[in-house]
Image: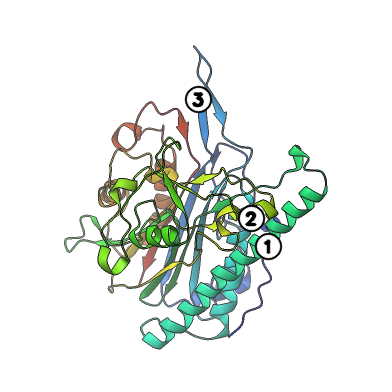
Amino acid sequence: MGVQIQPLSPQLLPLSDCLMIDHTEVREMSNDDLTLLEEMPYRVTWQCRQQKGYKYAGYPIRQKVALHDYCEDFYFPTDDTPLSDYISKHSDQIFIMADGHAGHEAARYFTSGIATGLIQILNERMYDFSDSKHQQVISELICNLFEKLDREYTNMKIKEYQEWLAGGQIRQKKPMDDGCTMVVNIIQRGWILNCNVGDSRTVVAKPSLEHQEWVQCFSSMDHNMMHPEKVHDIHRNGGKFLDMSGTTFLNINVEPPEIRNGKLYAELCYSRLFRPICDEIRQVGCSHRRTLNLTGTMGDLLFKISPPVLTSKPDLTFIKLDPTEHILVVATDGLWDHLHANGVDVQNRTVLRKITDYMEQNITIGSDSDMNDGVFDALGQLCEVLVDREGDSMDELFTMNVQRYDDATVMIIHIDP
């Protein structure tokens, strides 16, 4: 089944140039939006906040300096997105987040293209995520969508470099070789479909039996440098691994996934991916000196020039929900990498504990009365706490005295069945 993708105009995805990006205005809903909400079989409440990356420079007086002109993280939907752009006519809801690196173009492009492609796929027919045949069909469509958009972006960048070479290689006009992570969550009746490329993370949680805390029931797997399947694919495709300083190649014993049996490559923690120069790279004209600390991305021309070293194929996980409320915490590494806690499970518990503590003071988990009215405000305030890494919660959550803070985006979604 083919889907013709007409991506959203990039102008519909706003560029953010302020340090703290606070989206708190609730737009007035149209009659069509209100009708769509009334037909929903469940209620979803969500909030998202961002903080643009910055660093401290100067001595003896430290000054906060932005890392780049615009935030390189993008998410969808935004506050002014019509409901019909992210809720299908079959009541599937789409939430997307991308963390850009080396620029903002890729994150903007893929967020737009995947949002457009997914709503078209979900509007074409009603999928039942509990049916294994339906799971197979939509998984294939989504993987094809990711890979198709990645090829298109690669070809677009190759054309930009060819024009740059033909135009005299003016340094100021050199194209951007950027990429991004991509995480998608599709919420359906009693199910979530999580799609993940890169190290932006989704955590799904539900109340404990006593309704006293949020407990994890799913976490996506980061495509970091320790990922067993991705490391094997990179090694097989000719990629090399450098130490964290980028000066020494690491010789490791890379095993087939069926032998590795899910064991992480701890020896590659903090390593970086390097691609040796070849004729195909020379012909394109991009630099082969770039390194990367991810094993799965969207974009990143250097690593996608045929024959590619990296893949854009997402991990897909169908998550069956219990008949109770759930929350999803979706965040870029600007949150996870700045936490005191080390290790995915400990990081996830730390964030869920913060959410539990806050909700205990403001709303009652499992309570029906005025639940969603309180949840909307609480989610927004929680997102603000989690992206403001030098705010009031710094001591209890984040590492202190850091010189550089990456862009951070946190979205929290509450599902009320």
Whether residue 409 is visible: yes
Horizontally, is 23 left or right of 293 in the view?
A: right
Q: Looking at this view, name the residue that lies furthest to the right.
A: 167
Label 1 or label 3, whichever comes before in sequence order: 3
In 3D space, how far apart are the residues under numbered discs 2 and 3 (Cα atoms)?
Answer: 41 Å
Give the number of the disc on residue 279: 2
In 3D space, how far apart are the residues under numbered discs 1 and 3 (Cα atoms)?
Answer: 37 Å
- Return the residue at label 1: 155
- Return the residue at label 3: 56
Q: Is residue 194 above or below residue 168?
A: below
Q: Which residue is rendered at x = 17% and y = 64% of the image?
A: 209
Q: Quadrant of the rendered structure where residue 169 is?
A: top right
Label 2 or label 1, whichever comes before in sequence order: 1
Q: Nearer the viewer, residue 392 or 226?
A: 226
In 3D space, how far apart are the residues under numbered discs 2 and 1 (Cα atoms)?
Answer: 17 Å
Whole-percent x and y of residue 105? 64, 51
Label 2 or label 3, whichever comes before in sequence order: 3
